Each structure stands twice: as C-alpha cells, then as structure tokens.
C-alpha cells in the first residue's frame, strides 16, 4: 500500500511540474495523460532506486564539498534521464534541457515531501501524536 501511495504522490508532483516551461506532457485525453503520469512516476522511481545510490557513492566527495547541494544536480540529471527513457518507451513526456530538469526535479522533491508529510500526519492515529 505504501508503494502505491508513493507512486500517486509522485504522479501529482510530476503533474505539477508540467506547468513549468520546458516540461511537456502529451496525450490525447485525460485518461492518456494519467496513464502517462503513472508510467513516468514508476519510471522515475525505478531510476532513483537503481541509480541514485550509485551516484551518491561515486559523488560522495562532491556531496561533502558542496554541503549536499550536488544532490540537486544529481536529481536534475535523474529527472532528465527519466525524460529520455520515457521517450525511448514512446511515452509523451519530455524535458527540454538541464535547467528544465533542474527546476522540475526541485518541484518534484518539494511537492513529494510536502504531500508525504501531509499523508503521514493524517494516517497517524490520534493516540500516537
């Protein structure tokens, strides 16, 4: 259930990024767009699960030297890679370049964190607060 909830939160976050210039979501109707968002969210999750630990390990020194700001670059590159892979899978989702990916990844991170915090707080029983 937690995985499904995480995918739905990521879907909303990616959908919000499509309002930014340089991030495009195609599709003929609402159902096609929702399915595209679902597929892109799963793809982005897989990219993050597989490649982010590798990037963190290889870029450990850069993370330390930049006090973690290098993570923003890594997130942007992973978001951009997701766009490329979506294109290879014939999904109508495209990110135009690094800066669009940078702002998109930043928005996805902020919105996902906020929504996850809200969901976590509403799912906590009153007794545990």
Image: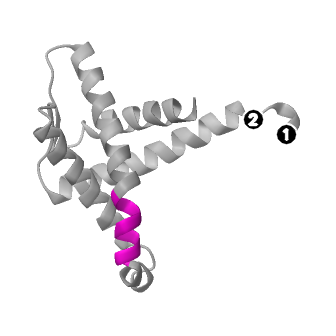
User: In x, y percent, where is residue 23?
Assistant: 18, 42
Mark seen at residue 41 = none
Residue visible at 27% across and 51% down?
Answer: 79
Q: Is residue 54 magenta?
A: yes
Q: Quadrant of residue 11?
A: top left
Residues shaded magenta: 51-59
Please name whichever residue, 27 or 48, is drawn nearer the observer in this view of the structure.
Answer: 48
Q: Is residue 87 magenta?
A: no
For the point 11% across and 40% down, the residue is 88
Quarter-of-image position of residue 72: bottom left
Query: How far, Cα to Cα, is label 2 from label 1?
Result: 7 Å
Residue placed most toward the observer, 85 or 25: 85
Image mark for residue 128: 1
**Residue that mark 2 sits on:** 124
Image quarter hosting the N terminus: top right
**Mark 2: secondary structure:** loop
Label 2 environment density (alpha carbons within 10 Å; few <14, some 14–19, many ≥20): few
Location of the C terminus (image quadrant): top right
Residue depicted at 21% across the width and 53% down the height: 81
Q: Is residue 1 above or below residue 104?
A: above
Specify whether 68 is left or right of 32. Answer: right
In percent of width and height, residue 43 lies at: 30, 41
Q: Position of residue 103 (x, y in %)?
A: 28, 54
Do the residues bearing badges 2 and 1 touch, measured as CB atoms within 8 Å?
yes
- Dominant secondary structure (helix, strand or loop) of the stretch shown in magenta: helix
Relative to 69, is 109 above or below? Answer: above
Q: Position of residue 30 (x, y in %)?
A: 25, 15
For residue 33, side relative to residue 111 (left or right)? left
What sort of colour scheme is used for the picture? Answer: one colour
């Amino acid at each position: 259930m937690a995985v499904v909830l995480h995918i739905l939160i990521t879907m909303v976050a990616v959908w919000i990024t499509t309002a930014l210039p340089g991030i495009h979501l195609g599709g003929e109707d609402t159902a096609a767009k929702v399915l595209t968002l679902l597929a892109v969210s799963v793809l982005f999750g897989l990219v993050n699960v597989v490649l982010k630990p590798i990037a963190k390990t290889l870029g450990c020194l850069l993370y330390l030297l930049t006090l973690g700001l290098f993570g923003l670059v890594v997130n942007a590159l992973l978001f951009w890679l997701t766009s490329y892979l979506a294109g290879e899978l014939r999904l109508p989702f495209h990110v135009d370049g690094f800066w669009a990916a940078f702002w998109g990844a930043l928005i996805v991170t902020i919105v996902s964190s906020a929504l996850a915090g809200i969901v976590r707080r509403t799912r906590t029983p009153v007794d545990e607060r």
